[in-house]
Image (cartoon, rainbow, N blue to C red):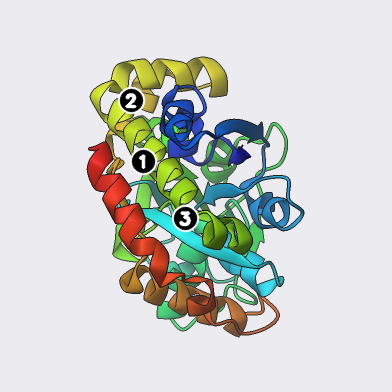
Amino acid sequence: MTVTIGVHSSNPSLYYLSRLDFLAEELAPLGESGVFHHYTDGTRTGALLADGTIDLGGTGSTPPVTAQAAGHDLVYTAVSAPRPDHGALLVLADGPVARPADLKGGTVVLGIGSWQTHLLAKALHAEGLSYATDITPVRPGPGADPAAQLRSGEIAGWIAQGAELAAARRSGDFRVLVRTGDVITDRSVFFARRDFAADRPELVAAVSSALARADAWVAANLSEAAAIAAADLGGSAEDWRTALATLPWRLEPAGAEFIAEQQEAADIFHGVGFIDRPITVADAHLPSLEAPVAAALAKAV
């Protein structure tokens, strides 16, 4: 069969895998081939799995929870190590917001439906506030400049990542109100259609090995990887290198600790109405995948 992997620029492991030869090299001994399906919005990953467009994809922590709540039959395959400095909730350095509770009544720009929703919802929950009622979450609009909006006072906070975060921190105009790693593990999460994962675990293992090899390549070639991202996605190579250097570039099987993290997120999301029904995250855990994925990851590094 031809294995179709979903790729979008917000998942760094998949982004670089699609530019390297590792997927073909890992699938060839199994007599299979691979192709990449590129799309821009990672929150569509669950739907693309459900309709058969892709066999496996990856996002941050939130999209698989919302996909499971939407009834999509997915299975977790692998996760990154925690990414404590992948992103941050920024506020104006000399502004009035000193703690998350001070965001009440304000507008926060973030990638709604991404891991950033998980970060903000949990940070507010810890302060006794609700993502649903106490702040106004807004997606960055086309051509919008959240840094300028924050400077002008139009918004109260902005969750940034990647080169944008590096540039914002370098400017000195903003302060980190919430460091991602102080609230959530913020793992990169890989998941597949259940039929694909259950029927062909050796293919899941091969894809996991390819992803681990791509991660190892980036870790060993940060400047080249940064130049690729800058040319393709914008921003400076210097800021991209800073951003890429914060990531762990290490994958793990999707085990019990991760499932517990996701269940906590799912419970918070249901409590604030971000998902409309409770879910049992363990339903998307296939324990039989852990051993072959662990073996594949160990072989790759």
Q: Viewer-proximal residue, 188 or 24?
A: 24
Say what amino acid the circle numbered 2 marks: Arg
Q: Residue 241 has which mark?
A: 2
Examine the rendered structure and indicate whether residue 131 appears above or below residue 212: below
Mark closer to the chain start, 2 or 3: 3
Label 1: how many Cα within 10 Å (few below 14, some 14–19, many 20+): many
In this rendering, the answer to whether 231 lies above or below 140 is above
Pair 2/3: label in front: 3
Q: Which residue is mark 3?
A: 201
Q: Is residue 134 above or below residue 179?
A: below
155 relative to 122 in the view: left or right? right
Tell which tag, 3 or 1, sits nearer the viewer: 3
Q: Quadrant of the C terminus?
A: top left
Q: Which disc is residue 209 wearing?
A: 1
- In percent of the image, x 54 and y 82: which residue is there? 280
Image coordinates of residue 221 in percent, x first then y, are 28, 20
In the image, residue 14 lies at what x, y percent? 49, 37
Of residues 38 and 270, the one drawn nearer to the viewer in this rendering: 38
| Residue 148 appears in the picture as rendered | yes
- Left of 83 or right of it: where is 108? right
Q: Which-is-in-front pick, marks 2 and 1?
A: 1
Of the residues under marks 3 and 1, which one precedes in the sequence?
Answer: 3
Element type where label 3 sits in the image: helix
Where in the figure is residue 76, as x and y percent of width and height? 48, 62
